[in-house]
Image (cartoon, rainbow, N blue to C red):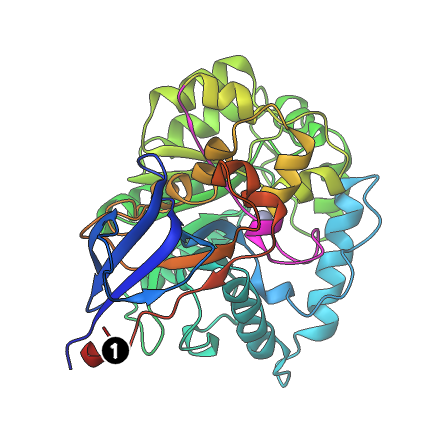
Amino acid sequence: MSSAWIYKAAWVIPVDRPPIENGVVEVHDGLITAVRPAMPHEPGHDLGDMAILPGLINAHAHLEFSLVEQPFQPTQRFTDWIRSLVAYRRRVFTPASTDQCVALNIGAIEAGLSGTTLLGEIATSDWDELFLPTHGPRVVAFRELIGLQSAVMEQQIEIAEEWLTRKAQLAPVTYGLSPHAPYSVAPELLRRVVDLATRFDAPVAMHLAETRGELEFLMHGRGEFVEMLKSFGAWPEGGFALGRRPLDILQTLADAPRALVVHGNYLSDEEIDFIAAHTQMSVVYCPRTHEFFGHEPHPWRQLLARGANVALGTDGRGSNPDLSLWNELVFLRERFPDVAPCTLLELGTLAGARALGCEHECGTITPGKRADLVTISLTESGDPLEQLFVTGRPMLIETAGKSASSV
Ligand SMILES: [Zn+2]
């Protein structure tokens, strides 16, 4: 049955153009058909002193850790944190466990309740789209691939190819690939994954330039990652190619149809310029995770100043207290009051859509796009963007299944 709906609110904030006071969003069959000022005495669903915003976009999460109550410790050495994470996975995700199923479900619901309508998720071996809630955010699921030794390379490529040929069963899912990180993926595997993604027109996400230890490892083949890989029995028989920088990895990633550089905490000027020059590439900044590890200042404003696309992610609950993208925006607003709120809102919406290759269907309130809409209450008059991050949390507007007679 066809459905049509008119929403009125004190403000509509489309993101791709200035806020509209006393605005209207018209929706037909789940798509936005008009965004405009309200006419006098116009009928419709009046939301009162609210702002209507596009749904939020969380470009990087690990929902499998959604049942973790406190982020993993310790964090002084990044590899110690990884060891805690790996120990958790081994302890909790046994073959008979249903915890991963529950974690994906709960995590997607949590993200949805905080206004997230699209989420970039890293999927490991037990991940299944059937675990996702039917009414949660849509998901771009990046299959994690790990391999330093030639013996596992063929198996990883097989997994990747099978992943990209999957069809969603119940949940709306797009499939991508995630070669995990430069210290866990051999250059040859990365090359082949990017080639495969190109063949399937799929996005690629990779953790990169995350720690100083990673840079030391790439350049000199020494430091904490050597010790960790040896203890995991993952040290490659032929050793590592040395003298590399994140730029070398970026040059391979640039061949993918879309590439998400996850974290990018320690990108150099040259690497920032490289990303800015490749519009299919984005950096995903995870603000509270970045703070959790006590990293040096993140170069997100330099990236923006040079025209790069910067999306936001929550990362998983292994390094963040919750999965609310809204809380990332509030955090940024408090820490960086000099950054315009409209810029922050764009990071949490349109930039995320661009990163995930969905900017033609979501990320702004624009006719022709999906009616992924959230509301947030405004308590005072004046510039709605100035109030936005102090007034509460966003609520989803349910646009599916509404009857035409409701208008
Ligand atoms: Zn991650």
Query: Residue 286: which quarter of the image?
Result: top right
Residue drawn at (65%, 64%) of the image: 65
Residue 198 as seen in the image, left or right of residue 304: left
Given the current orientation, which residue lies at the most extreme bottom position?
96
Quadrant (top left/top right/bottom left/bottom right) for the C terminus = bottom left
Residue drawn at (40%, 66%) of the image: 397
Q: Main secondary structure of the magenta part?
A: loop
Q: Nearer the viewer, residue 68 or 206?
A: 68
Residue 13 as seen in the image, left or right of residue 67: left
Residue 375 as seen in the image, left or right of residue 295: left
Residue 87: give x, y in percent of width and height. 76, 63
Reply yes or no: does residue 311 show up in magenta.
yes
Quadrant (top left/top right/bottom left/bottom right) for the N terminus = bottom left
Residue 401: give x, y in percent of width and height. 28, 79
Query: Residue 259: which quarter of the image?
Result: top left
Decide: few, some or many residues near mark 1? Use Cα within 10 Å; few <14, some 14-19, many ≥20. few
Residue located beneath label 1 in the image: 406
Given the current orientation, which residue lies at the most extreme top position?
270
Residue 204: give x, y in percent of width and height. 39, 45
Q: Nearer the viewer, residue 144 or 347?
A: 347
- Residue 181 visible in the snapshot: no
Residue 154: give x, y in percent of width and height. 41, 55
Q: Which stretch did the figure color magenta?
A: 307-327
